[in-house]
Image (tube, rainbow, N blue to C red):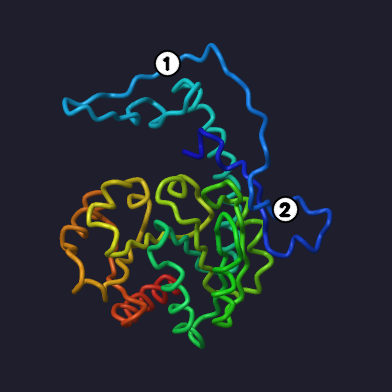
Amino acid sequence: MCTTCGCGEGNLYIEGDERNPHSAFRSAPFAPAPRQTMTITGVKTDHFAPTRTPEGDLHYGHGEAGTHAPGQSQRRMLEVEIDVLDKNNRLAAHNRARFAAKQQLVLNLVSSPGSGKTTLLTETLTRLKGRADCAVIEGDQQTVNDAARIRATGTPAIQVNTGKGCHLDAQMIADAAPRLPLADRGILFIENVGNLVCPASFDLGERHKVAVLSVTEGEDKPLKYPHMFAAASLMLLNKVDLLPYLNFDVERCLACAREVNPHIEIILVSATSGEGMEQWLTWLETQRCA
C-alpha cells in the first residue's frame, strides 16, 4: 500500500496553479516519461514467504507490517509506514482544528471507481441548495472532469490531480481547502480518488469517512476491503434503483458491512430514483448541527 511502496510520490496538480510559474504543483504529463532500463542482479526473492492455504492460495498480509513490498523487510516497511502516517496525521490534526474553528462539516467520500459517487454528490448538492453552504474538493489521478460536473451545479469546487498517487493526503487538503469560499458551518465534501485500499490509512482531517458501495459491485465487498469499511462512519448503498435487475442480496451486504464494523450506519440511496436521498440529507443536517 502507499505507506510502504511509495506510490504517493506522483506528480501533484491543484487547479489554478498553472497560473503561477513558481508553483510546486504542476500538471503531470498524461504519458509517462521515458525510463532507462537496467538489469538488476542479486535480488533475493525469498525474503518474505506468504502463508499458503491447503487450496494453494497465497496470503501476504500476515507480517508485522500487514503488507508486502519486494526488496523490503517487514520491519523496514513498518518503520516507513509509521514515518509516513505520523507526518500525515499531524497535518490532518491541523486541518481538523481549522475546520472545527469554523464549525464546518468535512466528509471524506471513498469508494471503488464507478460506484456512482460523483453522480450521487451532484444530486446531493442540487438538493442542498438553499439548505446549506457547500464546497467540494475533487480527487483524481488526471483530468478536471469531475470538478467541472460539480461546478455545473453552482457549487464551488477545486480539482486535485494526484498523478501516480492513488489517494488524497492531508497536505493536499491543506493546500486546496483555503482556495474554496466556504462559509462557517458549511459542508466540505472531499471526493477521494476511487480506491478502497490506500485512502483508508490517510486521515485528511475529516469528521467522517463515508463509504459509497453500489449494488453492482457484489455483497461481500466490505469483507474484501475491511480496513475501509472499518474506518467509515456511514455506508451509502448506492444505485438501489437497479436492484430489480440484479442478483444482489441486500441483507447479506448489510451483514458483511456490520461484521467488519458493527457501528457503521447504512443508508440505501439512488440519485436516479431519489430513494433514500432525504434520509441522507437528514443525516448530513444532523452531523452539521452536532
Is 175 situated above or below 126?
A: above
Q: Residue at x 42, y 67 (%)?
A: 117
On the rendered structure, is 218 left or right of 100? left
| Disc number for residue 47 | 1
Q: Which residue is drawn at 17% across and 64% down?
A: 247
Is 179 situated above or below 125?
A: above
Query: What type is the residue that disc 2 sits on?
Result: Phe
Secondary structure type for disc 2: loop
Secondary structure type for disc 1: loop
Query: What type is the residue that disc 1 sits on?
Result: His
Question: Number of numbered discs present?
Answer: 2
Disc nearer the start of the sequence (1/2) = 2
Q: Position of residue 175 (x, y in %)?
A: 67, 57
Most foreground residue, 38 or 247? 38
On the rendered structure, is 264 left or right of 81? left
Q: Which residue is drawn at 60% across and 62% down?
A: 143
| Disc number for residue 25 | 2
Is 165 situated above or below 241?
A: above
Q: Most extreme residue toward the right, as rendered?
A: 21
Distance CA(mark 1)–CA(mark 2): 38 Å
On the rendered structure, is 15 left or right of 20? left
Q: Position of residue 14 (x, y in %)?
A: 67, 59
Q: Do the residues labelled 1 and 2 touch (CB within 8 Å)?
A: no
Most foreground residue, 63 or 42? 42
Most foreground residue, 275 or 47? 47
| Disc number for residue 35 | none
Q: In which quarter of the image is the C terminus?
A: bottom left
Q: Position of residue 19 (x, y in %)?
A: 80, 64
Q: Position of residue 46 (x, y in %)?
A: 40, 15
